[in-house]
Structure formats: structure tokens, C-alpha cells
């Protein structure tokens, strides 16, 4: 019987460590998900800014083809 008791204690101990490890991994995954969401938001803002800059440059290039008023 003592052998079975030791096995049960060993299994319970392993389960407790595994549950703790799973909880820690879940916390890490949650933090990584938050970081990814922030990076995606920043990336989307950068893409939007680049599009606006490109449109601004394109618009100014089109207007620079006009002759200056003193001609």
C-alpha cells in the first residue's frame, strides 16, 4: 500500500507542477498577444502614414509641372 501512496503523491506533485507551468505559459502567451496587437496597430498606422505621404508627394509632383507664375 505504501508504494501506491507514494505513486499517488508523485502523480499529484507532477500534476501540480504541470498546472503551474501551464498557467505560466498562458501568461506569456497573453503578453505576447498584447504585444502583437500593439505592433499590428503601429504597423497599420505606419502604412496609413506612408500612403498619405505618397499621395501628398504625388500631388505636389503633379502641381510642380505647372510653370511658375513669372513665366
Image (cartoon, rainbow, N blue to C red):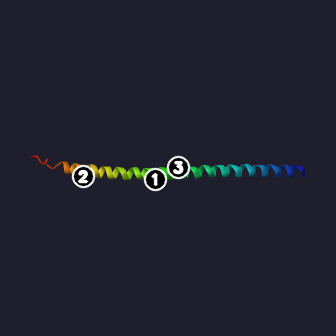
Local packing at callout 2 (Cα closer than 10 Å; few below 14, some 14-19, many 20+) is few
Residue plotted at (82% across, 52% down):
8
Q: Number of callouts in the render?
A: 3
Mark 2–mark 1 distance (CA, rounded to whole Å): 27 Å
Q: Which residue is mark 2?
A: 59
Q: Are marks 1 and 3 in contact (CB under 8 Å)?
A: no
Q: On the rendered structure, is 8 left or right of 18?
A: right
Q: Which residue corresponds to the image point at 19% horizontal and 48% vertical from the top-left?
A: 64
Residue at point 78%, 52% (across, down): 12
Mark 3, Cα crowd under 10 Å, few <14 / some 14-19 / many 20+, is few
Inter-mark Cα distance, 2 to 3: 36 Å
Compare residues 2 and 42 and report the one nearer the observer. Answer: 42
Outermost residue toward the left in this view: 71
Q: Earlier in the sequence, mark 1 or mark 3?
A: 3
Disc 1 crowd, CA 10 A, few/some/many (<14, 14-19, 20+): few
Measured as percent of width and height from the top left, residue 41 is found at 46, 53
Q: Which residue is mark 3?
A: 35
Which badge, 2 or 1, is on the more N-terminal residue?
Answer: 1
Residue labelled with disc 1: 41
Amino acid at each position: 500500500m505504501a508504494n501506491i501512496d507514494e505513486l499517488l503523491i508523485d502523480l499529484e506533485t507532477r500534476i501540480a507542477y504541470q498546472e503551474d507551468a501551464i498557467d505560466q505559459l498562458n501568461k506569456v502567451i497573453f503578453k505576447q498577444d498584447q504585444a502583437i496587437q500593439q505592433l499590428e496597430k503601429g504597423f497599420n498606422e505606419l502604412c496609413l502614414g506612408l500612403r498619405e505621404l505618397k499621395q501628398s508627394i504625388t500631388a505636389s509632383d503633379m502641381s510642380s509641372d505647372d510653370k511658375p507664375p513669372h513665366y
